[in-house]
């Protein structure tokens, strides 16, 4: 995720991981917060509580993701799965 001149870009450098997409861009003059949700096949980036959203198919090659934050406070939460059962 990169910001330059009011444009936020979600950039993938590996086509195998990105499902064929390389870049997503959105215009945003000021960013107050970022929330990133990732699972086994998708990546969603919410800027300013959802004012702008970028999403993409995402196929990580490893189970562990590395997050590097420069000049930001960063919190990482691991979410557990939810089991869905039928009531019929």
Image: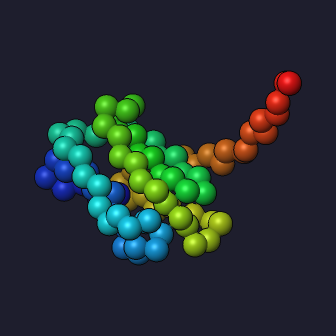
In the rendered image, residue 44, in percent from the top left (x then y), is placed at: 45, 47
12 relative position to 42: left or right: left
Quadrant occupied by the N terminus: bottom left
80 relative position to 26: left or right: right
| Color scheme of the displayed model | rainbow
User: In the figure, residue 50 lies in which quadrant?
Assistant: top left
Residue in view at x 82 percent, y 33 percent: 85
Quadrant occupied by the C terminus: top right
49 is higher (above) or lower (below) than 29 = above
In the rendered image, residue 83, in percent from the top left (x then y), is placed at: 79, 39
Residue in view at x 35 percent, y 46 percent: 54
24 relative position to 41: left or right: left
| Residue 15 at least partly seen | yes
Q: How many marks?
A: 0
Q: Specify the farthest residue to the right.
A: 88
Camera-nearest residue between 75 and 11: 11
Residue in view at x 19 percent, y 56 percent: 4
In the rendered image, residue 7, in percent from the top left (x then y), is placed at: 19, 50
| Residue 74 at least partly seen | no
Q: Specify the farthest residue to the top.
A: 88
Residue in view at x 82 percent, y 30 percent: 86
């Amino acid at each position: 995720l990169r910001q330059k001149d009011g444009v936020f870009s979600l950039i993938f450098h590996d086509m195998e991981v990105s499902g064929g997409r390389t870049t997503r861009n959105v215009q945003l003059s000021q960013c107050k917060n970022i929330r990133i949700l990732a699972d086994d096949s998708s990546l969603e980036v919410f800027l300013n509580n959802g004012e702008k959203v970028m999403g993409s198919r995402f196929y990580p090659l490893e189970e562990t993701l590395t997050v590097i934050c420069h000049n930001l406070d960063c919190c990482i939460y691991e979410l557990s799965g939810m089991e869905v059962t039928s009531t019929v």
